[in-house]
Amino acid sequence: MPIPSASISTYKDVTFDEEDTTLLKLNTDLLLKAKALQFSILPKMDVVLKEALSRVRKIYGNEVFNEDSITYSYPNFRENREHELKHDYDTAAMGITGARKPIWKGFERKDGKPVKIMSYALFFILSEEGLSLNFGRWFRPKLSGDSLKKFLEFIRQNYHLVQAIQQRSRMEPLFQFLEEEDQAAFPLSKYIDRLIGLKQFDLEFCTGVGLPISPYELNALINSFVFFYPIYDSVLRIAKGERDVFEDLTARFKIKDYLEYLEYDDADTGGENDDRPKPSLTEDEENLLARSVDGKKVVKAGMRWQVMERDDFKCVACGASSKEGKILHIDHIIPRSKGGLDVLDNYQTLCQTCNIGKSNKSQLDLRNKELK
């Protein structure tokens, strides 16, 4: 069970650790696994994405993120299915991509039909390796080579500014068709020429951190999203056939407006030699911390999702679900330190707010509203 702060209103209250990625490796009912990702991982990624978009709006202007973009999340599946779910989700992702409508007149399909989906996306993805920020095509529609080449030509024409953004955002190109020892000898501009020569037009960028992720690392990853955003915006404009405003957009960035977001940027990850002042805990947080230490390593990943499924992926106390922006936890009704067993009947699903409000001394079964 995560150890959150008293509120989930900011990214600083979000944690990602090995327990989250344990779910990705589970060999269990695929629909249950997909629902567990959707109801427990995606709400936390949603908090991170909203923080990133809030910074984008402040730095670049509200009109930059407009009706041309939509939120993209994965897993994304129909709950009411005629057939059994067969896809085994091994990642969870959330980000932004182009809206699904016929406005992408700057791109062409190979078959001549209108392009209704702009496949480039800027998104966070959780995998077994950790949490990363990625930019690239999240799926491969049948676009013409000339359409795909437009993005590479944009990078080449704006190479120096793109290189500055790439360095500040820590977004590294994912080299294909090159051995690792050859990558250092290939600057991005030369690599683009290589891709065009091979008629392989996909160029992706990525940066990431391993688990567990500190607030300092998560803040830096959100900053990477904001720094890289003008490149995403440029792809939207290319796909719509609009005028390039890349330099105008990057010129809006003012470091004085961004200072408040650099609090943890380029800092260490808070080890034992970290001399930054540590925030004190409230009584509620101390109660939650005690219960978390008691139960964090006890609730096996497979059991967690069985409990959530039994409780319909809702808080048994207030009825809230992740659809209302709540992060769900698994609570020991009778703490292990007080003799509680690690069995299904001793677990209940609580939202973060109700979990904080439940005293460590309480043995209240909120499903039945009775003291055990």
Image (cartoon, rainbow, N blue to C red):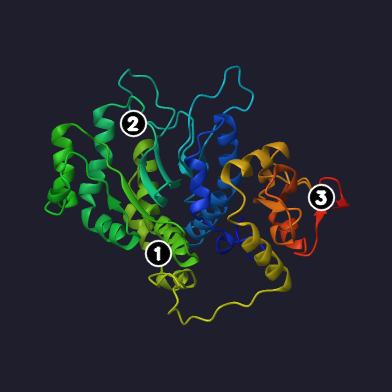
Say which mark, if any, is on residue 370: none
Nearest the viewer among 107 and 311 is 311
Instruction: Say if residue 6 shows up in the picture.
Output: no
Mark 3 and 2 residues: CB-CB less than 8 Å, in contact? Answer: no
Please give the residue where the numbered disc 2 appears in the rendered image: 107
User: Which is nearer the N-term, disc 1 or disc 2?
Assistant: 2
Please give the residue where the numbered disc 3 appears in the rendered image: 366
How far separated are the C-alphas under marks 1 and 2?
29 Å
Which residue is rendered at x = 50% and y = 60% of the image? Answer: 55
Judge from the rendering whether residue 6 lies leftward or rightward of residue 274; answer left or right: right
Which residue is rendered at x = 14% and y = 40% of the image? Answer: 194
How far separated are the C-alphas under marks 3 and 2?
55 Å
Nearest the viewer among 37 and 132 is 37
Judge from the rendering whether residue 98 lies leftward or rightward of residue 293; answer left or right: left
Nearest the viewer among 201 and 25 is 25
- Mark 1: which amino acid? Phe
What is the quadrant of residue 112 in the picture?
A: top left
Judged from the image, the secondary structure of the residue bearing numbered disc 3 is loop
User: Which is nearer the N-term, disc 1 or disc 3?
Assistant: 1
User: Which is nearer the N-term, disc 3 or disc 2?
Assistant: 2
